[in-house]
Image: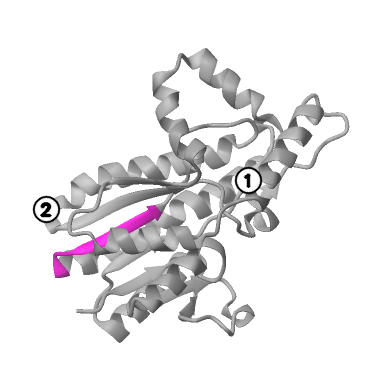
């Protein structure tokens, strides 16, 4: 039987790549975007939805269920970036970030779970980040949100096991996407004590994205996860160094690992 897939943030970047790969495999794919009018050429159906709007979340999920009778796979991909010295990131921007990157996926899960429990099957893939395993300077808030979503995935998988619902965390590294354009970053303040180190770190972060891998690679991995009868609970996707880093973090002395990270920023 064909599977019904719902991807948040399906209009660009990793979400778009996942949707386009899955549609080729003859899945029924729905994506979401805050403004679908900007993407008339989408290869799969886009629905208007903002993950920070609970009413739109419920409306979107109900729409898919009314059309297809079920949702087999939820892929929580929608998210935004944020950078800056923690001391200088405005509190309201931190709240906005968590509302999108953490509370958004939580509320999507809450909306979809009743339907999956009724079917006694389902798969939830939360797109986290290797940054949720390995912190780096000036990405504290972003890393914290992704780390929290990873642990929610881990614990939720235990809660839903009796209903035959699998919850997976997929952590990508740097991929060639437009996330730098949409992220909030504290401006490089001329009188900031962090000016020199933050500017250097920001330039390196942007360079990593610009030289990132093709997000189609994540699409292929998602297909592998969906096709598995017993998926793993955590997946990493990125360069050799990126996927090795979380393991090195627990093997190497803490000070040595921190030194290596800081040398790269």
The residue under label 1 is 82
Q: CA distance from mark 1 to mark 2?
A: 37 Å
Looking at the picture, the colour scheme in use is one colour
The residue at 22%/59% (across/down) is 228
Is residue 64 visible in this depiction of the protein? Answer: yes
Q: Quadrant of residue 155?
A: top left
Q: From the image, which quarter does the N terminus lie in?
A: bottom left
Which type of secondary structure does the marked residue at label 1 adopt?
Answer: strand
- The residue nearer to you, when weighing 265 against 194, is 265
What percent of the width, then of the height, locates residue 139? 60, 37
Q: Which span of residues is magenta-colored?
A: 119-126
What percent of the width, then of the height, locates residue 116? 21, 66
Q: For residue 122: magenta?
A: yes
In the image, which disc is placed on residue 162?
2
What percent of the width, then of the height, locates residue 101? 50, 51
Outermost residue, right side: 190
For the residues labelled 1 and 2, say whether their Cβ atoms are less than 8 Å apart. Answer: no
Q: Counting residues from the N terminus, which is met first, the one under dot 1 or under dot 2? A: 1
The residue at 25%/48% (across/down) is 232
Q: For residue 221: magenta?
A: no
- Dot 2: within a 10 Å radius of its alpha carbon, few (fewer than 14), some, or many (20 or more) residues? few
The dominant secondary structure in magenta is strand
Q: From the image, which quarter does the C terminus lie in?
A: top right
């Amino acid at each position: 039987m064909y599977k019904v897939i719902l991807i948040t943030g399906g209009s660009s970047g990793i979400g778009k790549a996942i949707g386009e790969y899955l549609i080729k495999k003859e899945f029924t794919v729905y994506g979401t975007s805050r403004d679908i009018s900007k993407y008339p050429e989408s290869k799969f159906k886009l629905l208007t939805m903002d993950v920070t709007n609970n009413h739109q979340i419920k409306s979107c999920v109900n729409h898919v269920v009314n059309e297809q009778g079920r949702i087999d796979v939820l892929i929580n991909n929608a998210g935004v970036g944020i950078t800056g010295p923690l001391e200088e990131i405005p509190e309201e921007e931190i709240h906005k970030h968590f509302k999108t990157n953490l509370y958004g996926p939580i509320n999507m899960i809450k909306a979809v779970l009743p339907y999956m429990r009724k079917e006694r099957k389902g798969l939830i893939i939360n797109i986290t980040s290797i940054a949720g395993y390995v912190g780096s300077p000036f990405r504290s808030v972003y890393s914290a949100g992704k780390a929290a979503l990873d642990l929610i995935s881990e614990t939720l998988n235990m809660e839903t096991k009796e209903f035959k619902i699998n919850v997976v965390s997929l952590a990508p590294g740097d991929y060639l996407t437009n996330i730098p354009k949409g992220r909030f970053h504290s401006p490089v303040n001329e009188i900031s004590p962090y000016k020199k180190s933050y500017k250097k770190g920001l330039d390196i972060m942007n360079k990593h994205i610009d030289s990132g891998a093709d997000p189609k690679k994540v699409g292929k991995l998602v297909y592998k996860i969906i096709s598995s009868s017993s998926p793993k609970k955590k997946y990493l996707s990125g360069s050799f160094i990126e996927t090795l880093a979380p393991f090195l973090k627990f093997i190497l002395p803490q000070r040595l690992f921190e030194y290596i990270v800081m040398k790269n920023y």
